[in-house]
């Protein structure tokens, strides 16, 4: 059994290590493959190539887990709202039309369009031993933000301009759950739910748009797959992480870099904690990587912790810095 799964299931402090966005643009191996495909989604929907990409960082750094190389926006794309990825801009979505919502009940079409994602998991499962295989999905709120805003909300975003409604959230909850079920059925051993834009939700609406939809997903998944650990990442909600954990009840909580790790230990119910390290650390000097790694080793010495970042690895990350962190963690494992 992998260190990650042991830590999640038994709350044993084994310091497993993996990184969000561990496969991608900072790796020369990835950039070489990227030149062979026309679009980012071409990569996601080619299981032979996407499985190679998934395994690149696992082999390069000897990480404790592989996470499926895909994207949260395969869901809206598979539901009929086409997604385009523009270099140095990011995802751009077609306008959301009523006909898209009317097609959301077509289960078989959805599964068929995501076949390559599920097949990738089968391929990877045969090639990794002693490593955890992580599947993932975007949370309903975050998916709705992209579908309604039609691009990343990171620039000049005004939430009041978007019409969030229960129908859209409910339908996305349904299909995000289906997407996870299929990943588990094909071999995913751990699941992470990314609510990357939860920090945009007004405090008085967190229950409606963040807590409740995620809890519904967990309730449904745990009925079918009680032994599959689920990690939740409601990025940007600050000290509301405590309320989230109490209400939703994930197996592990992934924290962003704004959260004080000591506060997290005190307030998050003793469940395994993941992440929190600022991704910018990999862009700077080696000595800073060493300093922050030892800081987290010392803080979490007696607590079940998964080494990870407060968000994904950035394109300008230095490979030698990533290697250095992994080496330090492995040298200091109990």
Image (cartoon, rainbow, N blue to C red):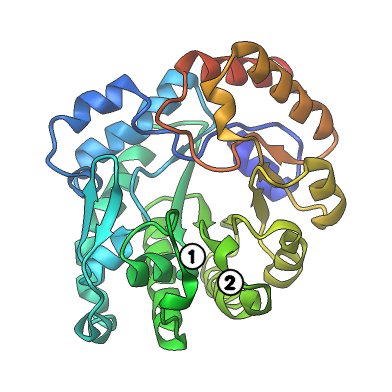
Residue 210, numbered circle? 2
The residue that mark 1 highlights is 139
Q: Is label 2 in a helix, a strand or a loop?
A: helix
Camera-nearest residue between 21 and 17: 21
Q: Provide residue 163's location: percent of width, then percent of height.
A: 41, 82
Instruction: Tell me the crowding category of disc 2: few under 14, some 14 to 19, or many 20 or more residues within 10 angstroms, Cα based.
Output: many
Q: CA distance from mark 1 to mark 2?
A: 8 Å
Q: Provide residue 228's location: percent of width, then percent of height.
A: 56, 57
Q: Is label 1 in a helix, a strand or a loop?
A: loop
226 is higher (above) or lower (below) than 334: below
Q: Provide residue 127's location: percent of width, then percent of height.
A: 36, 32
Tell me the residue at 38%/56% (across/down).
152
Please state if 328 lies on the left or on the right of 196 as rendered: right
Residue 85 in sight from this viewpoint: yes
For the N terminus, the image quarter is: top right
Instruction: Tell me the crowding category of disc 1: few under 14, some 14 to 19, or many 20 or more residues within 10 angstroms, Cα based.
Output: many
Tell me the residue at 34%/31% (across/down).
25
Tell me the residue at 67%/47% (across/down).
8
Proximity of marks 1 and 2: CB atoms separated by less than 8 Å: yes
Residue 47, numbered circle? none
Camera-nearest residue between 288 and 319: 288
Q: Which quadrant of the structure image shows residue 60?
A: top left
Residue 127 in sight from this viewpoint: no
For the C terminus, the image quarter is: top right
């Amino acid at each position: 059994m992998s260190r990650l799964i042991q830590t999640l299931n038994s709350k044993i402090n084994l310091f497993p290590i993996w990184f969000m966005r561990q496969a991608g643009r900072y790796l020369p191996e990835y950039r070489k493959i990227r030149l062979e495909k026309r679009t980012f989604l071409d990569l996601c929907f080619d299981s032979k190539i996407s499985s190679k990409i998934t395994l690149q960082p696992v082999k390069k750094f000897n990480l404790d887990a592989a996470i499926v190389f895909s994207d949260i926006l395969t869901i809206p794309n598979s539901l009929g709202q086409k997604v385009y990825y523009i270099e140095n801009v990011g995802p751009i979505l077609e306008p959301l039309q009523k006909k898209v919502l009317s097609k959301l009940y077509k289960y078989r079409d959805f599964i068929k369009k995501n076949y390559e994602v599920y097949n990738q998991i089968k391929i990877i499962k045969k090639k990794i031993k002693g490593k955890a295989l992580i599947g993932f999905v975007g949370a309903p709120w975050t998916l709705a933000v992209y579908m309604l805003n039609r691009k990343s909300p990171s620039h000049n975003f005004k939430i009041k301009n978007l019409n969030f409604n229960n129908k859209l959230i409910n339908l996305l909850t349904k299909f995000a759950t289906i997407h996870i079920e299929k990943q588990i059925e094909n071999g995913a051993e751990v699941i992470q739910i990314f609510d990357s834009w939860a920090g945009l939700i007004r405090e008085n609406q967190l229950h409606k748009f963040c807590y409740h939809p995620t809890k519904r997903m967990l309730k449904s998944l745990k009925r079918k797959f009680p032994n599959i650990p689920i990690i939740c990442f409601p990025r940007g909600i600050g000290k509301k992480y405590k309320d989230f954990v109490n209400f939703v009840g994930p197996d592990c909580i992934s924290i962003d870099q704004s959260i004080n790790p000591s506060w997290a230990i005190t307030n998050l119910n003793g469940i395994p904690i993941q992440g929190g390290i600022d991704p910018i650390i990999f862009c700077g000097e080696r000595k800073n990587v060493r300093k922050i790694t030892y800081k987290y080793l010392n803080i979490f010495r007696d607590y079940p912790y998964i080494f990870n970042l407060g968000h994904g690895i950035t394109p300008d990350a230095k490979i030698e810095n990533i290697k250095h962190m992994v080496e330090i963690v492995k040298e200091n494992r109990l």
